Image (cartoon, grey):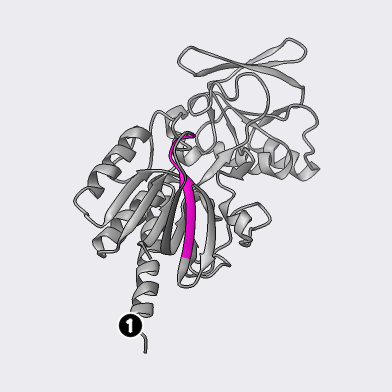
Amino acid sequence: MQYDVLIIGAGSAGLSAALTLGRCLRKVLLADGGRPRNECSPGVHGFLTRDGVAPAELLRLGHEQLRPYETVEVQCLLIDAITPQAGGFTATGHGTADDAPVTLTARRVLLATGVTDVLPPLPGFRELWGVGVLHCPYCHGWEVRGQPLAVYGQGRTVTGLALLVSRWSPDIVVVTDGPGHLTPNARRRLRRQKISIREEPIVRLIGSPQRELQAIEFEDGSQLERAALFLHAPQLQRSTLAADMGARLTSKGAVWVDAGMETSIHRLYAAGDTTPGAQQALLAAAAGNRAAILINESLTREECPK
């Protein structure tokens, strides 16, 4: 095998795993597939010693800190397919569309490819994403604290998120873009927290040149002034590699892993937003570190049989 470990994805999870495996003297290829999910955000928050750092700067630091580890190789490489073989995997990929295909082998593969957020197809959501339209109050709530906020969605999802966001502001309005499908109990809980509900269809979000939200415009022409809007957007895996290989997925489309962070396919691991659970850069980095330790111990057991 050319490599001990192929890491696919160079966000917080992938970089952290590469760092730990480099410190284990493992021969690693880190395949960097491109732009990160949080590139539209002005800062990564809640990351100890790096609170508020720009996403690109966090990645730059991660790459810089890999340089002393001579066994870690980083390539701009999109992995197209992975095939199990005796003792590991064969992977094929490419750099740019014009590059010749690349084939490599590795004893273990770690998927750290992350997810893609599927935003509502309304004007303003994509344009304001990361500044005026937000997904995580733990990541961005402090920056908009005390200001008039909106929470978008329907049913149980919007109810839970609105109640959570009320920790950061006393002025919350739920906007459902049509029937909200809210139970009487959900309406009671929102009302008790003084959270109002607007169920009119939405036409667009109005924002500033700095991508800040200014107002929500409804179909009847009325506008609701808000400083930011939170939503739990549906997500898709950024890579179909796990599904293509037949790995088990959860009901929400995340890649299932066991207690050892191994997928349902032997020697194939996953970490970060690719897997179920809370999503934050710091948590992804911790998951990458843990996956690297477990992978190294798995390789060691293979090298040092009983």
The extreme front residue here reads 100
Q: Is residue 282 visible?
A: no
As displayed, is residue 185 above or below residue 111? above
4 relative to 212 in the view: left or right: left
Does the magenta-highlighted stretch encompass residue 47?
Answer: no
Looking at the rendering, the stretch of residues picked out in magenta corresponds to 89-97
Secondary structure mainly formed by the magenta segment: strand
Q: Toward the viewer: 267 or 271?
A: 267
Hey, which quadrant is residue 63 in on the image? top left
154 relative to 148 in the view: left or right: right
Q: Residue at x 35, y 44 (%)?
A: 75
Q: Toward the viewer: 56 or 180?
A: 56
137 relative to 119 in the view: left or right: left
Q: Position of residue 262 (x, y in %)?
A: 50, 66
Q: Residue at x 60, y 19 (%)?
A: 124
State the residue position of label 1. Answer: 304
Q: How many marks?
A: 1
